[in-house]
Image (cartoon, rainbow, N blue to C red):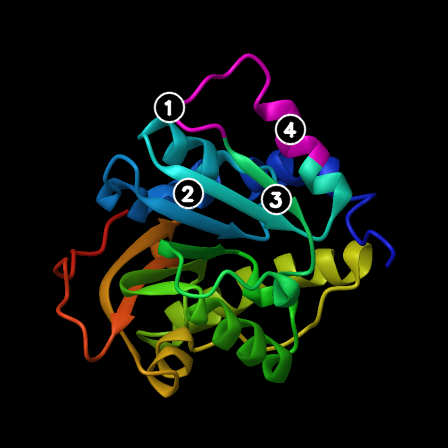
Amino acid sequence: MADKYKIIGPLYDFLSMIYSGKQIHRCKTAMNTDLQPDDKILFAGVGHGRDAIDAAEKGAQVTVVDLSETMLKNFEKNLKNRQFKHPIRMVHSDILKFEETGEFDMVTANFFLNVFPEEFMAKVMAHLTTLVKPEGSFVVGDFHYPTGNVFTRAFQNIYWYIAVGIFAIFAKNAVHEIYDYPSHLKALGFKVEKKHAFNVLAIPSLWSLKAQRMDSEPSTQSSPEAA
């Protein structure tokens, strides 16, 4: 399969910084604060993987899965001269073929699910939730679902469509509306127990969501939104 990120992959971190300052990075690492040493965490579609590195620095057992060889090579460059309690495990694979069911304390999909059309995104999300331990968590970091007044919703949509337009051109990613991840998670038997919003120009434009199975006791409480 062709690597869609050969062109834009090497620029991923640069574009992220230009587009959001440090807010995308903050969004991607927001739920890492809940990790305990030796927790097993999976990052699906790792990209350049600074969120995975942050988790490894906290003592977690990190596995990263990405279909893009370009992204994995860039991630490997970011690992240079770094040592962790548990070496990071890299898997070059289609995430739907990664079948370690019920093995992870946390499964994280940061800015990954939005690359797919909605029907396929729901399929990928459903598969990822099977990899979570019964008492574990599923985390999504992505563009904020439009809320608030007309101006706020307009900004959130414009901010999203500029980004998705760039990636549609250079990586052939799907073009679609911003996904309502809480609703999709609810349909899979999960409930968002913690969320954190990140502002761009004083408007909540990104968010990180942490969900658990509805029949599990929540381990965290909802946190206030932050700039």
Residue shown at 63%/68% (left/top)? Answer: 96
| In the rendered image, the vertical position of residue 182 relative to residue 42, given as above or below | below
- The mark found on residue 47 in the picture is 3
Classify mark 2: helix, strand or loop. Answer: helix
Q: Nearer the viewer, mark 2 or mark 3?
A: 3
Nearest to the observer: residue 103 or residue 203: 103
Q: Which label number is shown at residue 76?
A: 4
What type is the residue that disc 1 sits on? Lys
Residue 85 included in the magenta stretch of the image: yes
Q: Which residues are magenta?
A: 73-87
**Dot 2 amino acid type:** Gln
Which residue occupies the foreground of this view, 18 or 29? Answer: 29
Q: Which residue is mark 1?
A: 85
Secondary structure found at label 1: loop
Residue 60 is left or right of residue 162, and the answer is left
Instruction: Give the answer, above or below, for where 147 lies relative to 55.
Output: below
Q: Amino acid at mark 3?
A: Gly
Q: Nearer the viewer, mark 1 or mark 2?
A: 1
- 46 sits to left or right of 168: left
Q: CA distance from mark 3 to mark 1?
A: 22 Å
Q: Residue furthest top?
A: 81
Mark 2 vs mark 3, CA separation in Å:
16 Å
